[in-house]
């Protein structure tokens, strides 16, 4: 059975990629409905199911995240990862004949559009659940809406943020967090730095809820060792890569910190690293998973090449999924089998993981499931391994799926797994 | 630029600057303080809102959500930063980049909830608002509002205010400058004209235009008069020069004779040459003699003097032509062969040269008149004697005369054109005055205000009529008026004209008569309006200057001169007459027979001047015959040929069968009237007799009865001495032998109740004088007809209409009008006249009202909301088309434009009034249009029932 499936996927891989490309191109229209390509497969053994699936309405999943602006790569990668997985499911006849389609709206990584999009997705588009949201400032603002629509049983699944508000009352029951929290990420980073002997840890945070969330996490972790952040500096959200970060570099360097944790996004993070390294400061700099590690590294490599100076030394990144190159994990193997090499990013892998988890939940519902059925199914994902060697821990009282953090560090211009201390 | 305007400009500029500065200062102060208040108010609200929104997060110790709220506040315009402070003073969350400014806390320590700080690196200071969260138990929020944005908006406001003020000031200054310039310009042109006049270039003086009637206008007028006097003086001078010149030529003639004599004496004086010489030397004219060779043989002192020589020896023996006559006036050489002076002895004839020039010794020249006469010795010509005089003076005089004439003609034309233009300029605002006064009179006014406005109206009306006269006259003077020739019915024209005048005559108790001779063609070709203008003027004057008696108009054919047919019009009155010495003057403009009459009777005195011009334009002439105290007869002739297209018709219409042969008795104390009526009745082949009193009428009637040829119709005047029309009728009715006769009453002014009395007495009709020919005929036909059919028929005039409602049948008028003031006005006017009035607000309501109740007349406002008058009338007419009825609709419109009337009539309206509704016009229209209804009451009932 597994072998059959594998062979089938190999046959359809080219088509899936073409479809993914098409979707990437047409994503500008903000609305993307994905249909299975089942009709094309004349050799499909499940032909009967396929025909029926064409008649049943698809399950529409609502997405609002950043599709334009300086941080848009995050949104593109995440959605591409999820879509690839859903395409795979749809190619196999969907779930009980129903296809999965995702409807993407662009919030530009700004709170107000995020709120409007969420309302539209619930009110107008009648999506089954919300999915793949990105960012703390955006998601935090949409949380009250979920409470507002409480009677509709609408939930937000797998937001791409490790912040606290959706993990704490009163909003934790409306959100299913798959990835580990920023607390867990920062704790891992702090412990890593501590074990390496660094004591004066500085922080560069995005001047918003995401940054604050990270800062709180770092301080909490440092608190366990009786320390606090030696220096906290900030930057404004949605800055492009060519922003000057020299003031922040100078402030941190002058305060005598020996390691830096950045709570940011790839553009400004890369800019900070660039300006640090160019100023001759080579202290280790750590980023959180949210940064979009692959894109950040790409940008730094580009500049390194241009300047003839390696800017990528001594970088650490915490991740909530394994490295997309780490083939020890079945999920990574599966993902790599269905994604183009350039799309094999941490974020893409997270999208794939998110899709795998909700698909499993949907499989566990009966025919014609209600939203409540879906919530119950999500809460039943307890002890199920999505292919990462760890088990999900969802239950009716716990909406935090995973707690695992992976560390990576730069080796020769690429991310290598780094052992946790 | 004149000095005055310069000074004014500086003054204006200064004022404008001061006003602008003050205005700016006040506005700036007010607006900026208002903006500052707004700014702080807004800051307060924002901070309070933030404090509220972070409260639950802080209670939950959810700093991330609190940060999220801070983040949201940054998007509020004017907010630069915000932070949350824990009760212990630590900063929980903030929005600073790259870090929380360390100095801020020290700066804010101990400050009030609202304070201003200046952070290093910030431009200007920042308003910091502090609000406690949950009374400060969980923390405090701070928001920084940089004042830079406030200042920026204040500055942009200041810029806008400044630019607006400058623009307004610019416009005001410019307009003042323009107005000032318009005041100064006439003063300047006056000054220039005065300079021109004083430096003697005044010969070509043109009167200055009077642009306003203020002091400058008066000054200009005075200046023009003064200049005119100067010119007049100049002309006087010319006249004198001319006189002199004539005298001079007489002298010349005498001289010529003298010379002849002298010539004869020459023989005798030959021996006594000395004596001759003395004589010649003494002559004032220049005299010289030439021999056959052309050499000077003699010259006298005057000759030497004129030619500028000292001694005779300088000329003697020389050829004078070469010395003094060598070049023509134009500069061309004058060959001696052409010289007239030398022809004298060559041909042996006298020659006379006038206007050639002679040259003085010093090279200057002068115009001259020259006589040359051959000297004969027996048969042989031995030379010639030449006499010449200097005519420089005369030449100058002639030239000046010619120039003066041109100037005078130009001045006259300019004056007339100026008048024509001016009258227009005055009429326009005056129309405004009259219109607005009329409108004002229709509003609620106190008695005093009404009296004032009535006076304004009266004054404006008379001013307008004066101006109309002046305009008309000046147009005629300026040759800007043409006749508008068309074919028209002369009698019709005259009758309608007389009708408009009848009221005025009646008010003075005058008889107004009109008689057109039968041979006068019915349709003539001419300008009916101009003819009417003349008749109105002459008859109007006659009425004005006559206190009792009659005013009669007579038209006779005055034969033809070549192809032109002339009609002679005579307007005679029994008024004060005109003294013989003034008879000519009355036709001069701005003149009345006596300046005292002007005061008594008013008027511009232009009427007759205008009439004179018009008559001249019609190819006729106007004259007057009058004796003081015995009335006047104004005659005029006009070329009014019979219309070519219309067959010549003497105005007699085919008499209806019923009229021919009927005996009619005319009873009227006025001779002219009797004659007119008899003339008309005879045209219709009626057998008419006339008597001059009631007593005679009774006698005549009895006689006819006895002769068994009774009168079928009696036409009696109402006002007669001793026995009036009513007495006569009563008397006739009382006598059984005379009862059968049909009686018609003629009156020049109806009194209330007259028609009731007529009806009571069985009078068949009563007609207002002057009677239209057609109307009289129709009335007689009806009166006689009704007698035969034994049914009563009353002829209706506008007066009898009023009487009718005394008989219990109140005419019902529906007023459709949306404006409450106009509703009130119409209601008042109509109720005053005894109508039953109902008012509705629009066309739809009008239609409803018409369907519900019967009405006799609808006054329909053209412009109304919902459904306008045009639409309503069209709908009504459509409805009536099926019912076969017709309700009189009179349109009322605010703008008396030309097309309005057409629009009203097109919609099916019967008449048309323009707002403001004037009582007089309302009367006329109602009289005209309510008549058919009473004539056909049966039809009306149909509407009432159906």
Image (cartoon, coloured by chain):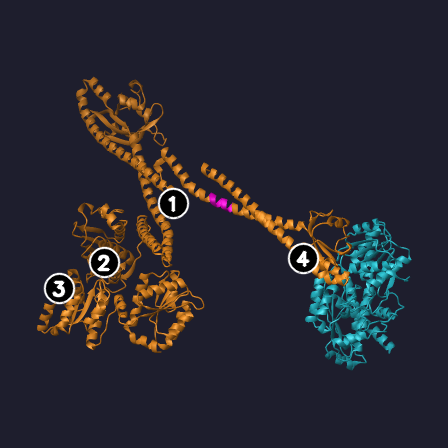
Q: Residue sitting at 21 percent across and 17 percent down?
A: B274
Marks 4 and 3: which is nearer the front? 4
Real-space Cα separation, disc 4 to disc 3, in angstroms: 107 Å
Query: What subunit carries mark 2?
Result: B
Q: Colour of chain B?
A: orange
User: Mark 2 — residue?
Assistant: B505
Where disc 3 sits, the SS reads loop
Marks 3 and 1: which is nearer the front? 3
Boundaries of the magenta span? B170-177
Q: Is residue B654 visible?
A: no
Mark 3 surroundings: few (<14), some (14-19) or many (≥20) residues within 10 A: many
User: Mark 3 — residue?
Assistant: B693
Kindly report the secondary structure that dominates the magenta region of the rendered protein.
helix
Q: Tell me which label, 3 or 2, sits earlier in the chain.
A: 2
Real-space Cα separation, disc 1 to disc 4, in angstroms: 65 Å
Query: What subunit carries mark 4?
Result: B
Marks 4 and 2: which is nearer the front? 4
- Percent position (x, y) of residue A213? 79, 60
**Residue B780 in which image quadrant:** bottom left
Where disc 4 sits, the SS reads helix
Report the number of numbered marks.
4
Mark 4 surroundings: few (<14), some (14-19) or many (≥20) residues within 10 A: some
- Percent position (x, y) of residue B371? 25, 29
**Residue B520 in which image quadrant:** bottom left
Q: Is disc 3 in the same subunit as disc 1? A: yes
Query: What subunit carries mark 3?
Result: B
Q: Tell me which label, 4 or 2, sits earlier in the chain.
A: 4
Question: Residue B46: which disc?
Answer: 4
Q: Which of B757 and B479 is in front in this view?
A: B757
Question: Residue B212: which disc?
Answer: 1
Where disc 1 sits, the SS reads loop
């Amino acid at each position: 059975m597994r072998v059959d499936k594998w062979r089938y996927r190999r046959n359809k891989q080219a088509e899936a990629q073409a479809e993914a490309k098409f979707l990437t191109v047409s994503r500008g229209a903000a609305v993307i409905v994905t249909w299975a390509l089942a009709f094309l497969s004349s050799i499909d053994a499940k032909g009967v199911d396929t025909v029926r699936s064409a008649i049943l309405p698809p399950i529409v999943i609502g997405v609002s995240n950043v599709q334009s602006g300086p941080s848009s790569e995050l949104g593109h990668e995440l959605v591409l990862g999820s879509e690839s997985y859903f395409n795979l499911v749809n190619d196999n006849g969907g779930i009980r004949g129903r296809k999965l389609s995702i409807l993407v709206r662009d919030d530009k990584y700004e709170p107000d559009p995020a709120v409007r999009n969420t309302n539209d997705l619930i009110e107008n588009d009648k999506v089954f659940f919300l999915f793949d949201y990105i960012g703390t400032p955006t998601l935090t603002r949409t949380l009250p809406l979920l409470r507002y629509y409480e009677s509709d049983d609408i939930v937000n699944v797998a937001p791409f943020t490790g912040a606290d508000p959706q993990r704490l009352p009163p909003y934790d029951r409306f959100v299913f967090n798959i990835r580990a929290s920023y607390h867990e990420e920062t704790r891992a980073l702090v412990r890593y730095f501590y074990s390496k002997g660094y004591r004066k840890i500085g922080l560069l945070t995005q001047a918003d809820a995401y940054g604050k969330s990270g800062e709180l996490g770092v301080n909490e972790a440092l608190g366990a060792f009786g320390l606090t952040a030696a220096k906290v500096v900030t930057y404004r959200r949605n800055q492009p890569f060519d922003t000057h970060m020299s003031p922040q570099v100078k402030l941190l360097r002058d305060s005598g910190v020996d390691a830096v944790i950045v709570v940011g996004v790839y553009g400004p993070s890369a800019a900070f690293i660039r300006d640090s390294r160019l100023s001759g400061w080579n202290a280790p700099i750590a980023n959180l998973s949210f940064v979009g590690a692959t894109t950040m590294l790409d940008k730094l490599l580009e500049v390194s090449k241009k300047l003839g100076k390696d800017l990528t030394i001594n970088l650490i990144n915490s991740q909530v999924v394994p490295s997309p190159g780490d083939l020890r994990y079945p999920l990574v193997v599966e993902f790599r089998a269905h994604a183009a090499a350039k799309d094999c990013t941490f974020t893409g892998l997270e999208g794939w993981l998110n899709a795998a988890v909700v698909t499993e939940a949907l499989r566990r519902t009966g025919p014609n499931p209600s939203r409540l059925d879906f919530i119950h199914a999500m809460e039943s994902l307890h002890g199920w391994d999505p292919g990462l060697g760890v088990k999900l821990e969802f239950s009716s009282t716990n909406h935090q799926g995973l707690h695992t953090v992976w560390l990576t560090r730069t080796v020769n211009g690429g991310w290598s797994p780094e052992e946790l201390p | 630029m004149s000095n005055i305007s310069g000074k004014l400009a500086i003054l204006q500029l200064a004022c404008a600057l001061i006003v602008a500065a003050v205005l700016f200062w006040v506005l700036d102060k007010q607006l900026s303080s208002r903006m500052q208040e707004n700014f702080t108010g807004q800051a307060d609200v924002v901070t309070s809102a933030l404090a509220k929104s972070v409260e639950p997060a802080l209670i939950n110790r959810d700093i991330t959500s609190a940060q999220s709220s801070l983040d949201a506040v940054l998007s509020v315009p004017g907010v630069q930063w915000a932070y949350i402070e824990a009760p212990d003073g630590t900063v929980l969350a903030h929005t600073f980049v790259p870090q929380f400014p360390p100095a801020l806390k020290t700066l804010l320590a101990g400050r009030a909830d609202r304070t201003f700080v200046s952070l290093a690196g910030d431009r200007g200071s920042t308003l910091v608002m502090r609000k406690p969260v949950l009374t400060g138990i969980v923390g405090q929020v701070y928001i920084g509002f940089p004042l830079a944005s406030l200042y920026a908006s204040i500055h942009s406001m200041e810029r806008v205010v400044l630019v607006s003020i400058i623009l307004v000031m610019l416009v005001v200054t410019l307009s003042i400058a323009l107005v000032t310039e318009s005041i100064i310009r006439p003063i300047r042109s006056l000054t220039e004209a005065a300079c021109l006049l004083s430096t003697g270039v005044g010969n070509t003086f043109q009167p200055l235009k009077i642009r306003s009637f203020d002091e400058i206008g008066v000054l200009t007028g005075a200046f023009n008069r003064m200049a005119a006097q100067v010119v007049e003086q100049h002309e006087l001078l010319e006249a004198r020069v001319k006189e002199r010149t004539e005298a001079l030529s007489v002298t010349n003639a005498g001289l010529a004779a003298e010379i002849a004599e002298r010539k004869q004496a020459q023989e005798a004086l030959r021996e006594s040459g000395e004596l001759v010489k003395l004589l010649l030397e003494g002559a004032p004219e220049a005299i010289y003699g030439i021999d056959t060779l052309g050499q000077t043989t003699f010259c006298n002192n005057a000759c030497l003097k004129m030619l500028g020589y000292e001694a005779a020896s300088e000329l003697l023996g020389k050829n004078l032509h070469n010395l003094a006559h060598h070049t023509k006036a134009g500069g061309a050489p004058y060959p001696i062969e052409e010289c007239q002076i030398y022809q004298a002895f060559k041909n042996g004839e006298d020659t006379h040269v006038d206007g050639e020039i002679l040259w003085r010794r010093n090279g200057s020249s002068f115009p001259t008149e020259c006589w040359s006469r051959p000297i004969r010795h027996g048969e042989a010509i031995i030379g010639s004697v030449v006499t010449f005089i200097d005519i420089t003076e005369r030449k100058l005089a002639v030239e000046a005369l010619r120039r003066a004439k041109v100037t005078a003609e130009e001045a006259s034309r300019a004056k007339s054109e100026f008048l024509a233009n001016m009258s227009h300029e005055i009429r326009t605002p005056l129309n405004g005055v009259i219109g607005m006064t009329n409108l004002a009179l229709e509003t609620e006014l106190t008695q005093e205000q009404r009296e004032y406005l009535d006076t304004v109206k009266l004054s404006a009306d008379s001013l307008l009529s004066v101006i109309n006269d002046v305009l008309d006259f000046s147009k005629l003077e300026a040759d800007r008026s043409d006749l508008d020739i068309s074919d028209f019915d002369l009698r019709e024209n005259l009758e309608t004209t007389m009708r408009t005048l009848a009221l005025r005559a009646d008010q003075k108790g005058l008889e107004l008569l009109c008689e057109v001779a039968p041979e006068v063609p019915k349709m003539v070709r001419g300008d009916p309006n101009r003819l009417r203008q003349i008749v109105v003027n002459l008859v109007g004057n006659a009425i004005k200057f006559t206190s009792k008696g009659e005013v009669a108009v007579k038209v006779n054919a005055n034969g033809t001169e070549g192809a032109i047919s002339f009609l002679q019009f005579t307007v005679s009155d029994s008024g004060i007459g005109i003294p013989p010495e003034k008879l000519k003057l009355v036709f001069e403009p701005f003149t009345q027979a006596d300046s005292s009459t002007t005061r008594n009777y008013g008027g511009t005195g232009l009427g007759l001047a205008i009439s004179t011009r018009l008559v001249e334009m019609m190819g006729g002439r106007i004259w007057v015959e009058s004796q003081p105290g015995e009335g006047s007869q104004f005659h005029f002739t006009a070329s009014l040929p019979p219309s070519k297209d219309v067959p010549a018709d003497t105005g007699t219409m085919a008499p209806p069968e019923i009229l021919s042969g009927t005996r009619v008795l005319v009873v009227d104390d006025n001779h002219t009237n009797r004659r007119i009526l008899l003339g008309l009745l005879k045209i219709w082949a009626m057998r008419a007799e006339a008597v001059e009193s009631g007593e005679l009428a009774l006698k005549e009637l009895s006689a006819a009865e006895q002769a068994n040829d009774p009168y079928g119709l009696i036409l009696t005047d109402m006002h007669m001495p001793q026995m009036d029309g009513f007495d006569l009728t009563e008397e006739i009715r009382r006598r059984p032998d005379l009862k059968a006769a049909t009686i018609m009453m003629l009156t020049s002014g109806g009194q209330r109740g007259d028609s009731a009395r007529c009806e009571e007495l069985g009078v068949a009709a009563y007609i207002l004088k002057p009677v239209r020919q057609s109307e009289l005929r129709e009335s007689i036909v009806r009166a006689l007809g009704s007698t035969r059919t034994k049914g009563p028929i009353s002829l209706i005039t506008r007066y009898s209409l009023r009487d009718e409602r005394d008989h219990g049948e109140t005419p019902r008028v529906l007023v459709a009008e949306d404006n409450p003031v106009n509703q009130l006005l119409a209601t008042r006017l109509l109720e005053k006249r005894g109508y039953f009035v109902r008012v509705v607000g629009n066309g739809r309501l009008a239609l409803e009202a018409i369907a519900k109740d019967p009405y006799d007349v609808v006054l329909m406002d053209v412009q109304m909301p919902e459904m306008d008058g045009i639409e309503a009338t069209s709908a009504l007419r459509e409805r009536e088309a099926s019912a076969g009825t017709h309700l009189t609709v009179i349109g009322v419109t605010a703008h008396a434009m030309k097309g309005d009337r057409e629009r009203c009539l097109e919609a099916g309206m019967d008449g048309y009034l323009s707002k403001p509704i004037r009582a007089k016009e309302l009367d006329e229209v109602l009289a005209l249009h309510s008549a058919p209804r009473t004539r056909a009451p049966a039809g009306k009932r149909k509407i009432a029932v159906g």
